[in-house]
Image (cartoon, rainbow, N blue to C red):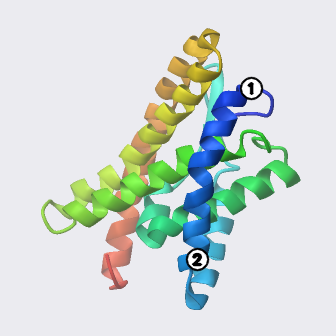
Amino acid sequence: MHISEGVLSTEVIGVSSLILAPLIVNSIRKLDYEDISKVALVSALFFVVSTIHLPIGVTSVHFMILGMIGVILGWHSFMALFMALLLQALLIGFGGITSLAVNTLNTGIGAMVGYYLYLFFKDKMDKTIVSFLVGFVPILVASVGIAIGLFFSNDEFLTVAKVAVLAHFPLAIIEGIMMVFLFRTLKKYQIKGI
């Protein structure tokens, strides 16, 4: 779920922009030439996958594959997600320019949680459990980020914030299961790093 244009308060937009700016600058500074195509490919994949919406009750959610993005890109996830969300806002009207920093932070932090879950537990836990968590937890983290952004913009959004978190729970389960199958497929074909 993208936070739409005109929903967030000026304070939330400002704080999220100040937090996101150094993350994007750091990603650009550390981006190697050979990683540019990987970042672009993952950004395009997120752009396409996140246009697939699932209706849940009174709202809808969309796939995000944040765990996979985090595992593949690490800290460059912020750059890839920023580009995809910017293009979605400009080309198809998902999200918005004023909510771009909050949407990027929510998804980027979720991707980084997936990255660190994988990094810390890949050799300590069963691969099936780790891969499920890498798909499941980032979605919940991003949905909590959405709820926090909405709540701090206007406390009247508390009900919407709760619905956002609850609506993302089934999606988190689906993405966890998807990640299990993805990891098994990559392991079968001996993809490096998995």
* Residue 170 in which image quadrant: top left
Taking the spot 31% from the left edge, 77% from the top edge, the residue there is: 187
Vertical placement of residue 91 versus 13, above or below: below
Q: Residue beneath label 2, please?
A: 29
Outermost residue toward the top in this view: 156
In the picture, the disc for residue 7 is 1
Taking the spot 62% from the left edge, 15% from the top edge, the residue there is: 157
Residue type highlighted by circle 1 = Val
Please say whether residue 55 is visible from this viewpoint: yes
Q: Position of residue 104 (x, y in %)?
A: 61, 49
Residue type highlighted by circle 2 = Arg
Quadrant position of the N terminus in the picture = top right
Outermost residue toward the right in this view: 91
Vertical placement of residue 171 versus 182, above or below: above
The reply, left or right, for residue 2 in relation to residue 162 is right
SS at mark 2 in the image = helix
Q: Position of residue 168 (x, y in %)?
A: 50, 33
Q: Where is residue 181 in the image (x, y as percent from the top left)?
A: 37, 62
Would you call the spot at circle 1 few (<14 residues within 10 Å), some (14-19), or many (20 or more)?
some
Vertical placement of residue 92 versus 193, above or below: above
Do the residues under discs 2 and 1 have CB atoms within 8 angstroms? no
The reply, left or right, for residue 155 in relation to residue 120 is right
Quadrant position of the C terminus in the picture = bottom left
